[in-house]
Image (tube, rainbow, N blue to C red):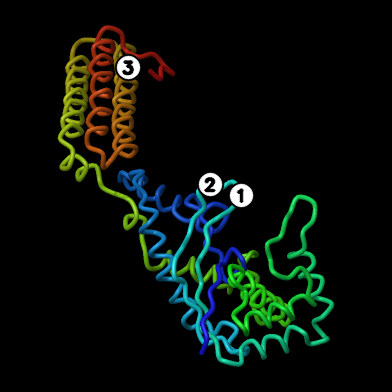
Amino acid sequence: MKKFETTTNIVLVMNPGTYWGVFEYDRLWRPYEEDERGNGNIVCNDYNFAKFKEAMVREANEVLKDSGYLKEYGVASVKVTAMGSPKEYNFGDDWFDLEFEVEDDFLDRAEKAIFDPKYRKMLSEYAEGSWRSHDGFITRMPAQSLDELHKVFDDLRNDKCGRDDMRAFGSVIELLREIEKHEGRMSREDGYEEDSLTMQLERRIIENYSLSEFCTVMSLDEAKQRLGCLRKLFDDIDKQRKSIEEQVVKYCDSNVSDAAKERVHDIQGRILEELGRFVMKAVLEVEDEYPDMARVEYGIANVSEEFNRRVEECWRQPPGRGNDR
């Protein structure tokens, strides 16, 4: 047995991209986030990307373990050893570091398949289209044509690839994948076909994990238990709510016209809407700043100050329609 390393940046065994790929947060988790909020829960912006990457590596290996990936050419196993991310996502996306364990005759079997005359035209066009430098693109692949791949095979056999070993081995795997796709035995990973390894990985992540494993999700009651400042603000808002409701009842029980009752109920509705907005402002402070308690308390204090000021204003002059202060 021999071992070789490469990455999904070189050969797309599966696509773990969280920027352009299916694991992008809005595509993967946003629907679940909306469901949590729809159930009255708080979803904090403390998403643990490192923990998510650990889950991705773990589940990717489960997918690969039973995949029989390129087994007919002598690949014994493929393992994901780590998930990497670019410093900036403008020009790249996340990748998996891969370790291939192959039979001793893997390179012979691979070379025979790749240079089979029936694949020559297809693979020549692929190699020159994907590996050759052109305007706006400078290749770092060790071969820029199919014929140059003979030297790559020799260098791999003699361990002479040096720093290009990942690209050298990756180029071999890449052409084997093209053969398998051509023969209908392998799915396109960049097309997110239903039976692709990428889609299998996505299903495992969705089935085996919840959003709350990677960020803080809590009910309002839980948030009030953890955060005294939030509990006090919500208590103050509830007191104002009850006070307004009691006064409206007393007012309507007095000798006033139906028109006056209708007007006071309208005012009550607008004040309650405004109180609801302060609840949402407080929730947003928790979502944005938790678990930094100092910043949460600072944000809630500002909301509380604005709330107290607005309550006084409302008693002097009830909010009008469309007032979003």
Residue at x-position 22% and y-position 37%: 293
Q: Looking at numbered disc 3 in the image, what kind of residue is underneath it?
A: Ile
Tell me the CA gap for discs 3 and 2. Answer: 51 Å
Nearest-to-viewer mark from 1 and 3: 1
**Tag 3: Cα neighbours inside 10 Å, few (<14), some, or many (≥20)?**
many
Is 178 placed left or right of 160 in the picture?
A: right
Q: Earlier in the sequence, mark 1 or mark 3?
A: 1
| The C terminus - image quarter | top left
Residue at x-position 76% and y-position 50%: 136
Circles 1 and 3 in contact, beta carbons < 8 Å: no
Location of residue 211 (image quadrant): bottom left
Residue linked to disc 3 = 267
* Helix, strand or loop under label 1: loop
Residue linked to disc 1 = 91
Q: Position of residue 268 (x, y in %)?
A: 29, 20
Residue at x-position 77% and y-position 63%: 132
Q: Looking at numbered disc 1 in the image, what kind of residue is underneath it?
A: Phe
Tell me the CA gap for discs 1 and 3. Answer: 54 Å
On the question of residue 268 being in view, the answer is: yes
Q: Position of residue 142 (x, y in %)?
A: 69, 69
* Above/below status of 262 relative to 54: above
* Above/below status of 324 relative to 82: above
Q: Earlier in the sequence, mark 3 or mark 2?
A: 2
* Helix, strand or loop under label 2: loop
* Helix, strand or loop under label 3: helix
**Tag 2: Cα neighbours inside 10 Å, few (<14), some, or many (≥20)?**
few
In the picture, the disc for residue 270 is none
Q: Position of residue 180 (x, y in %)?
A: 68, 81
